[in-house]
Amino acid sequence: MARGFKVFSIVVTVLCSLLVAQSASANHAWGCYHWSRPSNPFTVTFGNNLAPNWAPYLTTAASDWSKTSGACNNAQNPIRATVVAGSAKSRNCRPGTGVVEVCNGAYGNTGWLGIAQIWVSGCHITKGSVKVNDTYFDTPTYNTPAWHSFVMDQETGHTFGLTHQDEDFNNADLLDACGRGSCMDYSADPSNNTTPNQHDYDELVIIYSHSDGAAPQFATNPAGDAGVDLDDPSAWGQAIRFVNGRGVLYERMVGPDQKVFTWVTWAE
């Protein structure tokens, strides 16, 4: 009995150690939400509706999220992000099924720098959009390469199913073994937080460790989605996640088991 208990204790200890190691390296999945696909790697398509000064940041973000080789990346990274000509018909940036449209514009004094909006059916992401607000990015505070990269990489990261690694603007950056900060880590100075780091790639491997069937189809015009101006915070629905008392994630029901989530990066 004593020997059996000892073996059992060793097994439990090893399993717990593995779980702790995994959670320490990556634990920032956003609920159950992910793209449905039959196998890995898979492609996420971004539609470029951006002005020339913004387009290179989307190209770089797609490359950043697709990395598999090199130190502190992950060879099993399932994401292959590609950029194509956008097809959004207005600055509302409405996406078609299976695409993430990316837009910029002077959206006004809305308070937000960037938003990622993700349509889901059950646990499956079906489409998305990313918007960046030039009303703020045209000011000296935010008109820097670091802020452009930080917001573009973070908002595109949300469309894969990632949340933030950290939500304190004033603590030390969360660095990987190569000394890289993460675009999924809030920072008052994003100079070292302009790309994903190893923890982000590791989390993507965890999120997409299973396989799905074909992507579910989102209803063409769910009753709760038709004609809604999603640039306006009043249209985002209910705040379900807060940082310093301010909503950073909103949920809007648009149909049976269908929702639109809005992730927000606020101007400070």
Image: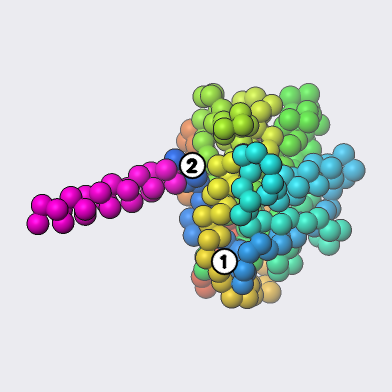
Q: Position of residue 211 (x, y in %)?
A: 55, 69
Q: Which residues are magenta?
A: 1-23
Secondary structure of the magenta portion, mostly?
helix
Residue under the image location 67 percent in, 67 percent down: 226
Q: Is residue 186 visible?
A: no
Instruction: Note whether 18 is above or below 225 in the view shown.
Output: above
Residue under the image location 90 percent in, 43 percent down: 52
Disc assigned to residue 25: 2
Furthest-front residue in view?
Answer: 3
Instruction: Note whether 174 is above or below 260 in the view shown.
Output: above
In magenta stretch: residue 69 = no
Residue under the image location 86 percent in, 58 percent down: 85
Q: Is residue 9 visible?
A: yes
Q: What colour scheme was applied to this rendering of the protein?
A: rainbow
Q: Position of residue 179 (x, y in %)?
A: 61, 28
In the picture, residue 61 is in which quadrant? top right
